[in-house]
Amino acid sequence: MTINVATGVARILKQEGIKWVSTFPVCHVNNALGQEGVPIVMMRDDRYAVALADAYSRINAGNPIGVCTFQGGVNAAGLQVAYAGMAQAFEDGSPVLCITDGVPIGATENSQFDVTSSIKSVSKWYGYVDKPERLPEFMRRAFTMLRSGSPGPVVLAIPDPTGLYDETADPYIPVKGWKSAPNPEDVTKAIELLLNAKDPLIYAGEGVIYAGASAELKSFAEMANAPVISTLKAKGAFPENHPLFVGVRGDQVDHYLEKSDLILAIGSSLSPGRFSHGIPNAVNKTIIHCTVDELHVNKSYPTAAALIGDARFSLQALEKELSDKTSGNGRALGNVAEEVKTALDSAMAQYREVMASTDKPINPYRVYAGLMEVLDPNKSFVTHESGNTRDQLSTVYETLVPRGFLGWGNVSSLGFSLAATIAAKISFPEKHCIAVTGEAGLGYMLGNLEVALREKLGITVVHVSNGGFSGYGPGFWGDGHDPFTYKVTGNDEIDMSNVIGALGYHTERVTEPSEVGPALKRALTANDSGQPAYIEFICSQYPIYGRWVG
Ligand SMILES: Cc1ncc(C[n+]2csc(CCOP(=O)(O)OP(=O)(O)O)c2C)c(N)n1
Ligand SMILES: [Mg+2]
């Protein structure tokens, strides 16, 4: 049967199990999506169209894949705005499928902006469907890239959506992802090194979540009797109430990174960035690097042993080898868990104090404590924003299941938390889904707040309203690092709960610390009936403790 390319795209997406597509108009495949019955979630700008699909892929570990469409072609206005979303997905390694209009053959010199090189710089793979009958081939390749190897965005450009091809000539068969197991020799070497180490530390990255390997990580860590830290993006990969869990950040994490003589990294690129830890004194440590991507081996640190392969297969192989070498007993028992508890108790003391604070304005840590009080960690989703809320929440918010919390930010593009929370609510309608933001994140979100109303998605935006841009460490203000660019119109001049309430959100403005929990509960009740909520907590300009180890 002869069909056009846009119809082919819609049908193949359905075959691939894609339940909906996010967009900002116009994109020339959108009408075919509508006609073929693929639901469309329309965001209010192109960057958020990408961010929603990106977040959906992250939250579901690429199963299913998030898909978005936006305007491209000679008039690449959509693509130019979407670029921010694609760049973020590329930096954070998110397997999102972006579909855009391609510059038509014959029009390639009609614009100053170079579509091809711009897309190539932010994608794992870019396919330009230069002939209608090649669509099945391009879609097969796209889903192969999305489901195999190191995750990253894939972009398909469709220059001729009306071009016809015979659907039966090359019938489409859905693509599975392919995974590989590490070389057994490398596994033997890694366990040899581990058994010779005095103070090993497991450094868990997001690859554990993409591989669905949380159970294997727990079981291996227990057999290795080794403490575990996780990266920001992997927060929740290891249950944070486990006796071997050290943390994501905080003084106890510093302490373990410093004192360990062996780091076994699994599912992390080990790229020291602004929001990840470097490895101090790396030359004096033994580094075992288990990753799906050889590009990262020997990149920042000399690697003593590497396992190239899927995180789940790697952990299974490591555990088996460790068991074989220790007659099933695992690494000799020491007082590892007790030491972790001591380090944690001492590092957390200062947070426990401020989490119970009755100060006015409200201490932001009091808000985070309130979230932990009212949310069921197994039935909720929390994410942070760029700024204070990321560093503070990732230090104190206890996460028990993968994606009970979404940490993000190799680059941390302000406003992403709204897209993440909408994606979470679409993924788990039964969960309470909360974005915690400051002024800057909220500013980015404003136009897109309407989406949750239109889609009847009961999400909650928690605003730590501190009247300015704090950012990191001591804050931008006062003696902080950006004293000329922190002040915005504050909560004494604008009541954002009125502004957002007028849109139709359940809103409250909370000034009393004792009202933190009750206000959050009322927001969740509104959410349960499909109404989104915005709660503005009038907070102090409070510094961040701890650091990302440099
Ligand atoms: C798109 C983008 N541009 C710039 C930044 C840099 N940046 C990081 S945090 C921040 C200010 C955060 O202030 P606010 O939202 O009020 O949060 P607070 O730290 O005060 O809680 C800025 C400008 C960024 N993360 N993303
Ligand atoms: Mg602020």
Image (tube, grey):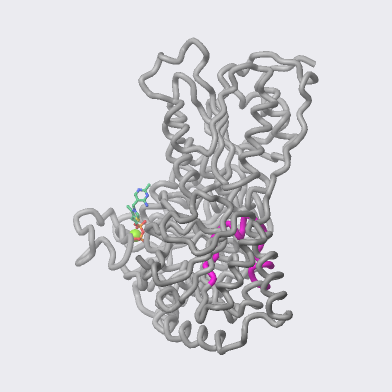
Residue 214 painted magenta: yes
Give, as a single range, the part of the protein colored magenta: 202-219
Q: Between residues 444 and 121, which one lies in front from this camera angle? A: 121
Residue 263 % position (x, y): 50, 70
**168 lies above or below 532:** above
Q: Position of residue 525 (x, y in %)?
A: 61, 63
Q: Which residue in the rendered view is the most extreme toward the top?
A: 106
Q: Position of residue 120 (x, y in %)?
A: 47, 33
Question: From this viewpoint, is residue 434 visible?
Answer: no
As displayed, is residue 478 above or below residue 309?
Answer: below
Quarter location, residue 527: bottom right
Residue closest to the eye, 351 or 199 = 199
Give the image quarter of residue 549.
bottom left
Residue 14 lies within the magenta run: no
Residue visible at 36% across and 52% down in the picture:
440
Q: Quadrant of ligand 2?
A: bottom left
Is 218 left, or right, of 42 in this rendering?
right
Q: Residue at x 43, y 29 (%)?
A: 117
